[in-house]
Amino acid sequence: MKIRRRPTTSIALAATVLVSALTLTACGGSSSAKDGSGRLDVVASFYPMEFLATQIGGEHVKVTDLTAAGVEPHDLELTAKQVASVQRADAVIYLKGLQPTVDKAIAQAGGKHAIDATAASPLVDHHLDEGTTDEAGHKHADAATGDPHIWLDPSRYAAVAKSVGAEFAKADPAHAADYQKNTDDLVTRLTALDQDFRNGLQNSGTKTFVTSHAAFGYLADHYGLTQIAINGVDPEAEPTPARLASIQKAAKDNGVTTIFFETLVSPKLADTVAKDLDLKTAVLDPLEGVKNPGKDDYFSVMKQNLANLQAALGARSAPTAQTTAGTTQTSPTAQTTAGTTQASPTAQTAAQATPTAQTTPGTTG
């Protein structure tokens, strides 16, 4: 498996050209940065930040996501047009350290309302002890940084939501009351989701799960689980033979039934480990992006993650169906068979049956 280096030279060049050609303005308060309807011009670095912006901003914001649907956010390379959009935005929401090209564009823009998610929820190191190495044997740079996946813990995500709401109110005081109401509503939904995870996982037969990508450290910590990751926080890093051997032993020792893979990265390694151990495979989505934004969102994918975890861990209690914003959602039961890959269906209403989509190994759901 090859490690793809994050290209930064072209980004620096594009940003430098733009800095010399444009008069930079602060990100907040300038009416010239708003569209014709007077909405707040907001740029989000990738899906979890875009979801917060749209939920909290509502009709008062125009949100641009720098990372297209279905694209792994680590691989983002900004175009000159995107760099310019960062510079003229009223507010930019990002997670510092995840996408260096975004960090550089924000630093050069010097924006007043640049909202860093890590300020509201500081990162924790969940990297593998042995780190990851590239083909030349050098330790991968990501191994020295904190785990960015804070949004997979609903309580941490709620803290970021509050900071976004506060900054929107500062950038657009005329609609501060609406931003506050939308923030409160979103935090209420996240608090309910947190309780669903607590209830749904408390009677698990095992507390250990194996995943292809070490994205679930915050979730594991918050709900008393143990994450065993094939790869590190960087999903494309190469696991060592010793790491693979230790994963196989841990899986056997802890009664693991399922190897989880994610939607935006190839499942081949997870499939290989599962076949070696005669285990099932299923999706555990790190929500770095949503492949079908017209069908899925943060809450539906997290509900499916919960259902898949319950099935893999042998949890005996199902989460309680919730009604949020007038929509009833339930978590469908995850079902897989040995050697097959489970797709992630959208959460269905209580009146509908939940379809189970299955594909052959080597394909994503």
Image: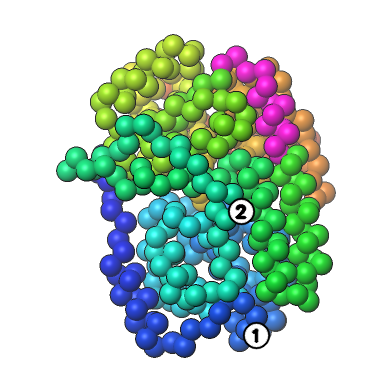
Report which quarter residue 81 is drawn in: bottom left
The amino acid type, in three-letter code, at marker 2 is Ala
Q: Is residue 269 visible?
A: yes
> Which residue is depicted at the point 29% across and 45% down?
140
Q: Please identify the dominant SS of the magenta region.
A: helix
Badge 1: residue crowd in 10 Å (few <14, some 14–19, many ≥20): few
> Which residue is depicted at the point 67% across and 74% down?
171
Q: Is residue 242 left or right of residue 57?
A: left
Magenta residues (range): 193-206
The amino acid type, in three-letter code, at marker 1 is Ser
> Which residue is depicted at the point 45% across and 45% down?
146
Q: Nearer the viewer, residue 208 or 145?
A: 145
Instruction: Name the residue carrying label 1.
Output: 31
What is the number of callouts on the image?
2
Label 1 – label 2 distance at C-alpha:
27 Å
Question: Nearer the viewer's eye, disc 1 or disc 2?
Answer: 2
Instruction: Name the residue carrying label 2.
Output: 120
